[in-house]
Image: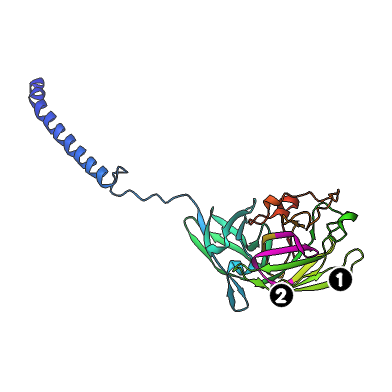
Amino acid sequence: MNAQRWGAMMPRLWSRLLQCWSLSCLWLLSGALACGGGDARPDAAPDPGPPVGTLQLNWQIQNGTQVLSCDEVGADTVILQALPRAGGLALVNSFACVDGGGSFAVAEGVYDVRVELIAGVNTVLGQPYEREGIRVDLYQDVPLGIVAFDVVPTGSLVFVMNAGAVASNCDAVADGGAGITSVVMELIASDGNCVPTTFQIGAGEGRAADFYQSDCAGASFACVERDQEIRVDDVSAGTLRLELGANVGAFACYQRSTIFDLAGDNQVTTLAPQILLSTGASSDECPRPNPVDAGVPEVDAGIVDAGLDAGSLAAGGAAVTK
């Protein structure tokens, strides 16, 4: 009897099961289409992302009440360091100065924070911002506020120049020198305009200290020897171009063009030795010196005056000091 009842009920059970299966499939399919193939559960929580919080940073540069741009002080980057109170190494992130702000994802914890404005590779401008005991919780954005760097927008420039592998810039060619009789120096601002400049010429062997006033109109100065340091103070920071020329008698025989970044905050930017290169004038006008081992490599004139820094290629880049 029981077997007969189960046998009679089976067709109806299979029919109901198939009906339920079909409805379930339709429900799941509609959920998948609506959710883009993700979790079909209507109460699924969104992915919260990595288990971190963030430090939110904004900055500005000023000189007193005057707001300045990154270029006006020669700044390149802003460095944020977060030292965990729990121990371990500091977490470091860098931002382009021109961005004006950014965020740094860190693990949950308590941090001591230091923020620095950097020129070049590692020159700190102004006073670093420091703040201790900042608590960061999971998925929390912690604003550090606007960090203001107070920076004087001027600095100093120092360099020496030489005519390559010769013993002297100023001695006659017959005596092993380059035969230079006068020089012309100009500083060009980023807008392409020449800036009237006072170049302070330091003392050298057998030569007294002096100064040269560049008037942007071709005024020249007596020959400067390779051991005489040249300095310019109170220069507006930013990207500059140094134009150097050297004459042998009435002829322009040597030249040099160097683009560089000058740091503000009264820092001293020291260029690599500025190696003067031939203008290509004929040997009748500009007698060729005989190279000697003066500790300075000869540089091919083909790499100069196209925005290339031949001095940096030959003898390293610029250094910045306080």
Which label was assigned to residue 215? 2
Where residue 248 appears, x then y in whole percent? 80, 62
Q: Tell whether 282 sits left or right of 102.
A: right
Task: Name the chief secondary structure element in magenta.
Answer: strand
User: 82 or 152: nearer the eye?
Assistant: 152
In this rendering, the answer to whether 57 lies above or below 308 is below
Residue found at x 56% / y 56%: 109
Numbered disc 2: secondary structure:
loop
Q: Tell whether 163 sits left or right of 93.
A: right
In this rendering, the answer to whether 28 lies above or below 47 is above
Residue found at x 69% / y 68%: 187
- Magenta part of the chain: 233-256
Asked if the magenta segment contains residue 241, the reply would be yes
Where residue 292 appears, x then y in whole percent? 86, 49
User: 148 or 66: nearer the eye?
Assistant: 66
Q: Is residue 151 visible?
A: no
Residue found at x 73% / y 56%: 281
Where residue 9 appears, x then y in whole percent? 9, 27
Q: Residue furthest bottom?
A: 65
Numbered disc 1: secondary structure:
loop
As shown in the figure, which amino acid type bears the numbered disc 1?
Ala
Which label was assigned to residue 209? 1
